Image (spheres, rainbow, N blue to C red):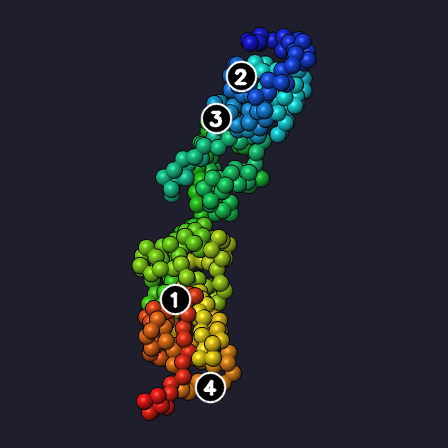
Amino acid sequence: MSWESSEAATEDTHSSNSDDGSATESTKPSKIFLRWMKIVSVDVDGTSTINDIKEKVCAAERIGARQQELFFAGTHLEGDKTLADYNIPLNSTINLYVIDGMQIFVKIPSREKTIELNVRKSDTILSVKTAIREKEGVPSKLQKVMYLGEFLEDHQILIACGVKENATLHVILCPTDELHISVAIMPTKTIKLHARSWYSIADVKLMIENLASVPTQNKRLYYSGKLLQENLTLYDHKIGDNSLLELQLSPVQVFVRTWEGKTLTVLVEENETVADIMVKIEKKLQHKLEKHFLVHEGSVLQEEKTLESSGVVGNSTIQLLVRLPSGVGH
C-alpha cells in the first residue's frame, strides 16, 4: 500500500490501521518508506528493528546510523525495538532526520590511501582521530590532522574549523611511526627490521618468519627482559627507534618415563641440550643420575646435542634408563 508524503496523512493512516491485525503479518516481507528530503524505500518485515532500518539507510544513502533519528506519528523510534513493537503497519512512511551529520574524506599520504568517514559537524578532531584509529589501527597520538594547510588541535570542532560536507582532511603520521629495530634471533645472529609503532607483536613475529625463515610459533619476544604480549603494539610496549628485541623459545613440556615406571613432566626449551635435561630430571628426582641415559623413539640421545636436533618436541615421551654394568645380562 502506498502512502502520501504529508505527515498528517501518515498520522491518520496510522491511527486507522493500528488495530487492523497488522501485527499478525509481522513476518510478511514488505517495504517501509522514509521521508528525508526525498522518499527512500527500504525492504523490511514486522520483525525488523529500528537499528536494522538505520543500517539499510546507511547502505543505501551513506548516512551513518548514529546520525539518523527516526520518528513515526510523533514517536521517536529507538534501538532494538521492532516495527511490530511500535505497531507500525507495513508500507508506512517514517520520518528520517539527519542530526548534524556529514561525510568527509581523510587522506593518509604515507599509506597512499583515502578513507571515508561519517561524522557530525559538532565532532572534535579527537573524535575524528578515534574513528581513524578504529578503521586503520593507527593510535590517535600518532596522528596529526591537517585541513587547508593548518594543523588542527584535538579540542577543535569540525564546523568551527570550516570543515564541510565532502571536505578532505590530511593525516600525517608522526615521525615516531617509523621504527628501526633489531631482533636477536640466535645468540650469534641479529636481524634488522623496518617497522611502524602501531605494528602488533604478532606482526613483528610474522616479519621475522618472512625475513629470516625462522619459525616463531613456539617462540616469544622480549624487550629489556619483559615478555611482549602479541596482541599489543610496539607503541603500547614503549618500544622506540633502534630498540633491541630478543626472540626466545617458549618452554614446552616433555614426559620422562623412568626405569621404575613413573612419568615425570619436565618443562624444556628446544635449544637446550640433552645434558641440560638430565640436570632438570636430577632436580625432580633429587638424586644424581650417573649411570643413566635417555632414549627417544628407540634412539639413545647424545648429551651434547639439543632436543631440537634430536627430534624431541613438545609432549614427546623420553625414556630414562639405567646403564647396566659391563658383563651384566651376558
For label 3, count other residues whose C-alpha is less than 10 Å away and answer few (under 14), some (14-19) or many (20+): few
Q: How many labels does the image show?
A: 4
Tell me which numbered mark, 4 or 3, is placed earlier along the sequence: 3
The residue carrying mark 2 is 30
Q: Is residue 229 above or below residue 260?
A: above
Question: Looking at numbered disc 2 in the image, what kind of residue is underneath it?
Answer: Ser
Tell me which numbered mark, 3 or 1, is placed earlier along the sequence: 3
Q: In this view, does 271 lie above or below 87?
A: below
Query: For residue 158, which quarter of the picture?
Result: top right
Tell me which numbered mark, 1 or 2, is placed earlier along the sequence: 2
For label 4, count other residues whose C-alpha is less than 10 Å away and answer few (under 14), some (14-19) or many (20+): few
Question: Looking at numbered disc 4 in the image, what kind of residue is underneath it?
Answer: Lys
Please tell me which residue is depicted at 36% across the width and 39% down the height of the picture: 112
Q: In this view, does 255 lie above or below 241?
A: below
Q: In this view, does 73 lie to the left or right of 115?
A: right
Q: Which mark is residue 288?
A: 4
Q: Is mark 3 on a helix, strand or loop?
A: helix
Tell me which numbered mark, 2 or 3, is placed earlier along the sequence: 2
The residue carrying mark 3 is 59
Nearer mark to the viewer, of 2 and 3: 2
Looking at this view, is 312 or 75 the one in front? Answer: 312
Looking at this view, is 254 or 147 the one in front? Answer: 254
Tell me which numbered mark, 4 or 1, is placed earlier along the sequence: 4
